[in-house]
Image (tube, helix red, strand yellow):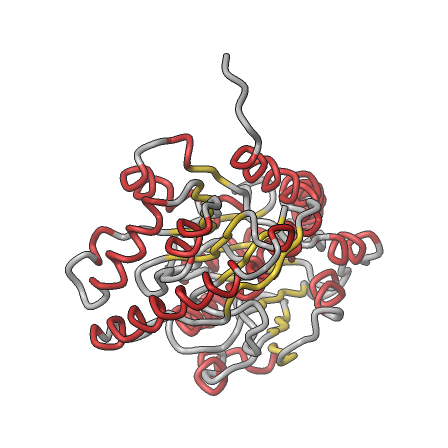
Amino acid sequence: MRVAFYAPMKPPHHPVPSGDRTMARLLMQALRYGGHTVALASTFTSYDRRGDADRQRRVARLGEALAGRVIRHMATRPACRRPELWFTYHVYHKAPDWLGPVVSRRLGIPYVVAEASHAPKQALGPWAHGHAAAGGAIADADRVIALNSADLPCLRMLIGDPERLAFLTPFIDAEPFLAAARVRVPTVATPHLVAVAMMRPGDKLASYRVLGRALARLRDRPWRLTVVGDGAARAAVAAAFEPVAGRVQWRGQTSPSDLPGVLADADLFVWPAVNEAYGLALLEAQAAGVPVVAGRNGGVPDVVADGATGILVPVGDPEVFAEAVSRLLDDPAGRRAMGRTAWERVRRHHDLPVAARRLDTVLRALTTPQVPA
């Protein structure tokens, strides 16, 4: 199937690393793995960070004009080269889709949205215009694919027909991490903790601050921490770890080829997950055979099996987070057992081939003629 792919928040090739960009690329990879031909339909960005109503209206006008140009361009192609399905990734009030609904309707092809979210509380707020547009696109989609179970209740209210809503378990291309886990050597001396996240203001910085306060409570215990990541908030992140600065190694931004080995060298992945959607780094760590301690937030329980592959704690509580870390520091055999379970669980449920098959099933149902009963 020929698929036109679009990400209104951030193009898949955006230069700034992020979980959003990574998932967009993973979805394109999964589509290709399933035998589909994928082309990026547009790099047009509708994202409004600040809630600027005037900007939202300007973006809407630009989007409507661009949709017309996309339609004309695609309509001039031979039938064998026109898209057979439009696939938009990550639609919500800050990043509505002004292209997909119009283009797919004019071309007569299915319209699919993946990782959509609907927040009724934003209906009268500063993103009201974007909220209405995103809600309309989601409601009109032929299929809505959720990647975060926390989004399902509001999506069900908006969509109505349960047949149009599907859930795709978050996934990664796990093989490099699984391979690193096969040759990992468990620490026999000081337990090695690791955290992987961009350093930017907002939720990421808030998570780093919770982690810093939690680890400061464990100064009487042996451990060391490797932090992978960089960004505009690096100085503020470093300040959050000042009480334990001597135990922290700052790796900076690590290449994708090096990350599996960095994770597999650790004994425990630690991340408070403040307002985390689900956390691809949590999956990467588990694929590398490393258990996690994380905040129970959003879709994090979709990727971490509490008590089996890690420990989930209330978000934002450094004392409880420290207690969970301490529990696993005291239990090396339990850590290793959790790591083995995590490795197996990612392989079976969160790997790219598994996601590709599930995704293909959803899309094929839209284009396969139904035989009357």
- Please tell me which residue lies in front, 74 or 367: 74
Q: Name, please, the residue furthest toward the left.
A: 124
**Percent of width and height locating residue 269:** 60, 60
- Please tell me which residue lies in front, 140 or 102: 102
Say which residue appears at 19% left-offset and 56% top-offset: 123
Q: Name, please, the residue furthest toward the bottom.
A: 235
**Percent of width and height locating residue 168:** 53, 42
Tally the marks.
0
Does residue 91 appear to the left or right of 303 in the view shown? left
Does residue 201 appear to the left or right of 79 in the view shown? left
Say which residue appears at 40% left-offset and 49% top-offset: 105
- Residue 156 in sight from this viewpoint: yes
Query: Above or below — where is 162 with respect to 268?
Result: above
- Please tell me which residue lies in front, 358 or 240: 358
Query: Above or below — where is 327 with respect to 228?
Result: above
**In which quarter of the view is residue 22 placed?**
bottom right
**In which quarter of the view is residue 59 placed?**
bottom left
Say which residue appears at 42% left-offset and 37% top-offset: 165
Q: Name, please, the residue furthest toward the right.
A: 183
Say which residue appears at 17% left-offset and 63% top-offset: 125
**Percent of width and height locating residue 64:** 33, 66
**Percent of width and height locating residue 260:** 73, 63
- Please tell me which residue lies in front, 282 or 323: 282
Query: Above or below — where is 325 with respect to 226?
Result: above
**In which quarter of the view is residue 200 placed?**
bottom left
